Image (spheres, grey):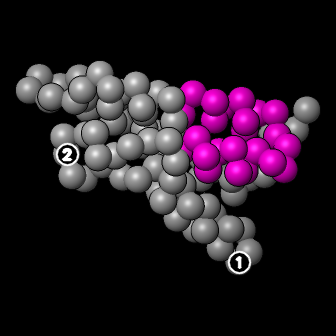
Amino acid sequence: MSTAPAPILSAALKTLSRATLLVRNSTYPGNDTSIEALHTLGEAIHDVPNLLLYWDEKNLEEIKLSFGVFDQSLWPEDTVPDLLSFFEEELKEEITKENK
């Protein structure tokens, strides 16, 4: 069993961290995040840890598909990131750091 390559692992963990902050922030009083929004977020991230842990080359596309499920338009704040774009940007940064 092998895990995801370091740049992918790091970018995905940063994205998962961002997603869990969205869940935490949705619990604050006065926040009107819908159950549908939370469900969509859960749907987008629930497979990612196993995809990282049991690595196969096709898993990168599966991770992108998973993060792509997230519909940021369901969230009340306009600062919520597109998880796929966030992941891809973090991945670019990680690859750049690794190649230095």
Q: Check contact, mark 2 vs mark 1: CB within 8 A.
A: no
Locate residue 11 relative to residue 6 in the image: left or right.
Answer: left
Residue 63 lies in the magenta stretch: yes
User: Looking at the picture, which amino acid does disc 2 mark?
Assistant: Glu
- Taking the spot 47% from the left edge, 57% from the top edge, the residue there is 86
What x and y, as percent, mark residue 34?
A: 24, 26
- Taking the spot 51% from the left edge, 53% from the top edge, the residue there is 84
What x and y, as percent, mark residue 79?
A: 25, 53
Q: Which label is found at residue 60?
A: none
Quarter of the view holding residue 28: top left
Residue at the far bottom in the pictured view: 100
Q: Which of marks 2 and 1 is in front?
A: 2
Q: Give the range drawn in magenta.
A: 45-67
In the depicted structure, whether residue 91 falls above or below residue 99: above
What x and y, as percent, mark residue 33?
A: 22, 30
The residue carrying mark 2 is: 77
The residue carrying mark 1 is: 100
What x and y, as percent, mark residue 2?
A: 87, 38
Residue at the far left in the pictured view: 30
Q: Residues within 10 Å of mark 2 (few under 14, many from 20)?
A: few
